[in-house]
Image (tube, rainbow, N blue to C red):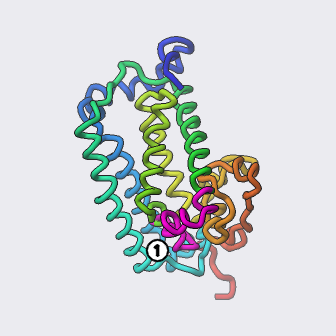
Amino acid sequence: MSDVGNVTGGQSQDLVLQPLWDYLHQNHHDLLRSPLFPVVLSVTTYFVLVGVYTALDLLAPSWPCINRYRLHPDKPVTWPNIWTTLGVTVYNHLFFIFPAAVAQWLWRPPTPLPPDAPTLWSFFLGILGCMFVFDFQYYLWHLLHHRVPWLYRTFHAVHHQYNQPFSLVTQYLSGWELFSVGFWATIDPILLQCHCLTTWGFMVFNVYVSTEDHCGYDFPWAMHNLVPFGLWGGAPKHDVHHQRPGTNFAPFFAHWDWLGGTHVVPAQSGHKEKDDCLNIKKDL
């Protein structure tokens, strides 16, 4: 995933991300070099996505055109659900993420910004590589914390208090699980020698798909509907995991669950059998 090929090879490919990188480099140099920037980027991305999904959750009961895409359209997300999960999320950010961010700011040197952008190929390949590595790491962690009762009770059970997840359940986690996820998301791009732009792209995409996995919706543009051959997990399969905790352990791809015999395909989403909310009833 190293960017050795940034200045060699296909010239047109090299130029695709360079204007963006030049703009960021020239106008936001100090911000991007700060050790706090990746934390701020990830946290901001998470709360923006959660805000959008929570708004959809609150609108869904009275908007059939939204509710038809919910995995459990007859079980709305309630304000008590929102406040409980938001409270744990804020607690985790204040007492785990914020101290870790301050520690990085104090002890980690500023991020060096190379003059060249990654090639488009190395950008997407780097994100894909980080996703594969992260997927394997969390699959093993997840499997272990389900198979060892003490680990499950102590660290992972809190995440399974909701058997029909919604977006705020994404980080409804113990401190240990949050630390594990954050550590891998930080260290994997370093291990694969990714360009810092690739690293930030991976962090944003990782937060996006993690939130999508827990969102409780089966939208046509969701990753599991875009990736062919059932290779992606997605919200329906993760929803099954919350109802049948011995299945679908991998966070993103499906191959580890296939190999481990823990892969379960969910029933077809109900929205595919429903009329669009804009249709007018004929009997009126």
Residue 205: x and y in percent read 49, 45
Residue 105: x and y in percent read 25, 40
Q: Name the residue rendered at 68%, 87% in the picture.
A: 283
Question: Along the horizontal axis of the image, is 224 left or right of 82?
Answer: right
The amino acid type, in three-letter code, at marker 1 is: Leu
Q: Which residues are magenta?
A: 144-168
In which quarter of the view is residue 107 placed? top left
Q: Name the residue rendered at 26%, 29% in the picture.
A: 29
Q: Is residue 218 visible?
A: no
Under circle 1, the secondary element is: helix
Q: Quadrant of the N terminus?
A: top right
Q: Which residue in the rendered view is the most extreme toward the top?
A: 8
Query: How would you classify the magenta stretch by its main secondary structure?
Result: helix
For the residue pair 251 and 266, the one nearer the viewer reads as: 251
Question: Along the horizontal axis of the image, is 279 left or right of 228?
Answer: left
Q: Quadrant of the C terminus?
A: bottom right
The residue indicated by pointer 1 is 59
Q: Which residue in the rendered view is the most extreme toward the bottom?
A: 284
Q: Name the residue rendered at 61%, 50% in the picture.
A: 140
Q: Is residue 161 magenta?
A: yes
Q: Is residue 272 above or below residue 97?
A: below
Residue 6: x and y in percent read 48, 17
Q: Is residue 27 above or below residue 36?
A: above
Q: Is residue 18 visible?
A: yes
Q: Is residue 51 magenta?
A: no
